[in-house]
Structures are given as structure tokens and as C-alpha cells.
Image (cartoon, rainbow, N blue to C red):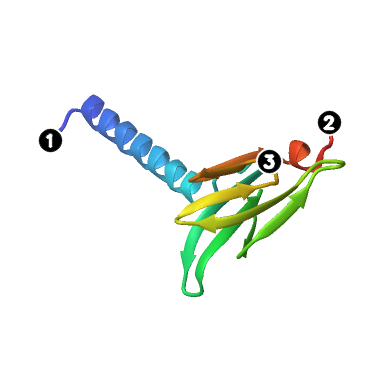
Amino acid sequence: MFPSKATLYLVLIAAGLIVVSSSENNQAANPQVDPSQVILRSIQTADGPQLEIRIGHLVCKTKQLTYQRKGGLEHTVQPVGGKVQIKSDRQSISSQHVEYALSWLTGER
């Protein structure tokens, strides 16, 4: 038989492992998402490549997105070759993953 101290330590270690394990699972199921961030990425669906737009817990999928900041150029965002492509009259940018602060995207300060 185990001495009482050894049994107590085993119970404490087991309880600690259970608590840590359950908190990790909870974080994986409910990740903390910054609602002020807009995340754009290219995904492949049954209908073909789509642009996935995440704002907080809101997720939208579309083939193309157009946005324009106050008094600025119009930008077209679309999935091209597994990347997100952002085009305007002046430039074209491609990236795997794009993040914007919502305040920057809308032109608010």
C-alpha cells in the first residue's frame, strides 16, 4: 500500500492534469477572436476557390470583394492560386493570409 503522502501527491497530480487538459480543450473550442480584426484568406470549396472573410465570430465566403476607403482607391480582393490577391489601379498584392484592423479598413481613426 502507498503511504498517505504519496497517495495525496498522486491525487493532486491527477487533478492538475485533468484541469489543464480540460482548459486546453475549452480554449480550442472557443478561441478568443479580436472582433476589431478582419482576416482574409483563400479557401477551396466545392464551388471553386472562395475568399473567406472573418470579423470576430462572423464568417463570410464570397468569390470577390470590392472595398474603397473614404476618398481612396477602389480595391478588388479575390482568391487567386490559393492566395488572397488585392488589386487597385496602382498596385497588386498577393498573400496567403491578410489581416486588417477594422478601423483602418473603414477609414476611422
Q: What amino acid type is highlighted by mark number 3?
A: Arg
Labels 2, 3: front one? 3
For the residues labelled 1 and 3, say whether their Cβ atoms are less than 8 Å apart: no
- Compute the Cα span from label 1 to label 2: 68 Å
Where does the C terminus fall, quadrant-wise? top right
In x, y percent, where is residue 4?
A: 23, 28
Point out which mark residue 1 bears. Answer: 1
Q: Quadrant of residue 60?
A: bottom right
Q: Secondary structure at mark 2?
A: loop
Query: Disc 2 designates what residue?
Result: 109
Tag 3 or tag 1, which sits nearer the N-term? 1
In x, y percent, where is residue 5?
A: 25, 25
Res. 44 in view = yes
Determine the residue located farthest toward the front in the rendered image.
89
- Which sits in the foreground, 22 or 84? 84
Determine the residue located farthest toward the bottom in the rendered image.
47
Q: What amino acid type is highlighted by mark number 2?
A: Arg
Q: Secondary structure at mark 3?
A: loop
- Compute the Cα span from label 2 to label 3: 24 Å
Residue at the spot 29% in from the left edge and 30% down from the top edge: 8
Tag 3 or tag 2, which sits nearer the N-term? 3
- Which sits in the foreground, 90 or 23? 90
In x, y percent, where is residue 42?
A: 51, 55
Labels 1, 2: front one? 2
- Which sits in the foreground, 47 or 91? 91
